[in-house]
Structure formats: structure tokens, C-alpha cells
Amino acid sequence: MKDSFSSYHPLVNFLYFGLVLVFSMVFLHPVCLAISMGCAFAWSCSLGGRKALKFNLLGLLPMMIFMAAMNPLFSHEGATILAYFPDGNPLTLESIWYGIGAAAMLVTVVCWFSCYNKVMTSDKFVYLFGRVIPALSLVLSMVLRFVPKFKEQLHVVSNAQKCVGRDAGSGSLLQKIKHGIRILSVMITWALENAIETADSMKSRGYGLPGRTSFSLYRFDGRDQGALAFLIGAGVYLVLMAVKGELYWQFYPITKGAAVTAWSLSAWLCYLALCAMPLILNYWEGRTWKRIVSNI
């Protein structure tokens, strides 16, 4: 399914990810964690389909459970003691809650970054920071682009070696090592040749010359202005609510947070609207398109 939010201006995309990533790491209130994790999970599945769903359920969910279970084994802070381990260290309720919260926060951030990699392409990043930090933006763009290309080329080389019986998973241990070294040598050669070709291509196109212009398809229209205004307004409001203490939550020495008030409810709704913004836009534009088609 086509993602509507990806078609917005790169500034809108980047600001959105900046807000949700920072807020996901700062707002440790259980309601905020649940909102952020749920929206990130849903959007990543919408972007990646079954592959993303499989990764989330079989990769991120077990990692979250493992991290939540490990924290009480190493952290023994907290006032509410539930039991004692054989070594005499206490098992506290606060360490359990903190383990769950920290694991949920980490999984949420990973999920948001998976969405970031699909939406914020290298050309969008260079468009935003090409004039401010041209060298750094180019290096970051090349690095982000190199990783998926390297994985794709590694898959091609591995399949080619497998066809002649020289893949890293066949033969004795010594043969596996030799085959693995051969594949690694091929990949290093490919990476060096690719770097030389990239440098020659950039030089031939006049990169770095004074007065050089760059072509871009991005236009900041009224739709982008509305989205940017919403992001700025939601971000400022949530920061004010956090400073006011409406999103406060602590795990140690006892687990407690701010009381539920009209202000906190409004902050949760604002945070939900912010995190679910891409999902809402996808639903709204899909509904609009169906209405237009039905009227033809």
C-alpha cells in the first residue's frame, strides 16, 4: 500500500521522526510508551507488510521480553520487595516495572527507526542538509545507501558461490573458513571498486565546484504547511505539558506518576494524534480516493 506521509516534504518527515524519537526516549509514562509503541508497530507493518510484521513479532517482541526479564536479575533497587534470589539479592516490583518500561522504550525506538529508513531516503537527507553540512550529509547518505547495497551484493555473491559448491555453509570447518574468506575478499574488492566509481561519477558531475546547482522535485505546498504547523504545535504543547509535570513518571524508589487530570488527558490525546499522524493521513487519503473513484 502506498504511504501518503512519505510524499510529504522532507522537512515534515524529518521533524516528525525527530519528535517521535525524542519523545519516545523521554516520556516514560506507561500511557505514552503504549501509544508510541502501538503506533510505531502499526506503521512499520503498514510500510513493510508481512516482512515487518514477522520481524516485529519474531524479533522485537522476544527481545522485549528478554530485556524485561533480565533487568530484575541485575537491578535490585526499589522499595517493594517481592522475594529473594538464592544469592540473597531482592526481587523488587520496581525493577520489574522498570525492565518492562526500558524494554518497551528500546523496542519502540527500533520500530521508529525502521520506519525512518523507509521514509527518509538518502536524497531527502541530502536535500535538507546538503547546503548546511554538505560533506557530512553526503557521507551519511552514502553510508546509509551503502549498507543495503552491501547486503544485496553479499546475497548475490553467496548464491553464486553456492551454485559451485563453495558457499560458507558447505564442507568441513576448514573449507567453510576458506569459502568465507573468499566471499569476504570478493566483497571487499566490490566495495573498493564501487567507491572509486562513485568518486569518478561525482567528479564528472562537478560535485564541489562553486556555483553548482542541484535538481530537486520537492515543493513546499499548502499541505506541507498544515502538517508542519501541526507538528510544531503538538511538539510545543507536549513540551509544556512535560514541564508542567503532567507526563511525569518515576520507577525508583517507588513507582508513581502524575495524577490523571484534564491536562494529562489532553496531553495523551495530543501525543496519540502526533504518533498516529501517518496512519491517520493514510486512512484519510485512502478514503478520499475511494470517494473520488465512486463519483466517477
Image (cartoon, helix red, strand yellow):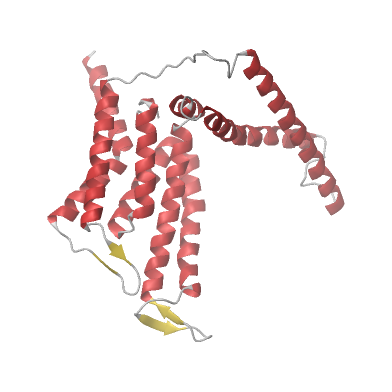
In the depicted view, which residue is nearer to us: 61 or 141?
Answer: 141
Q: In the rendered image, which quarter is residue 191 located in?
A: top right
Residue furthest to the left: 262
Q: Could you say where residue 153 lies in the image, as x and y percent from the top left?
A: 68, 32
Q: Could you say where residue 90 lies in the image, as x and y percent from the top left?
A: 44, 82
Q: Could you say where residue 241 lies in the image, as x and y percent from the top left?
A: 22, 52
Q: Could you say where residue 204 lies in the image, as x and y percent from the top left?
A: 65, 13
Quarter of the image where the C terminus is located: top left
Q: Is residue 272 left or right of residue 70?
A: left
Instruction: Report the number of numbered marks.
Output: 0
Name the residue rendered at 25%, 48% in the picture: 238
Q: Is residue 176 left or right of residue 81?
A: right
Quarter of the image where the N terminus is located: top left
Name the residue rendered at 31%, 50% in the picture: 35
Q: Is residue 210 above or below residue 276?
A: above
Name the residue rendered at 82%, 49% in the picture: 177
Answer whether residue 287 is visible to the viewer in this image: no
Q: Is residue 114 above or below residue 192?
A: below
Q: Is residue 139 left or right of residue 240?
A: right
In the depicted view, which residue is nearer to us: 134 or 33?
Answer: 134
Answer whether residue 44 is visible to the viewer in this image: yes
Q: Is residue 163 above or below residue 219?
A: below
Q: Is residue 211 left or right of residue 289?
A: right
In the depicted view, which residue is nearer to us: 174 or 143?
Answer: 143
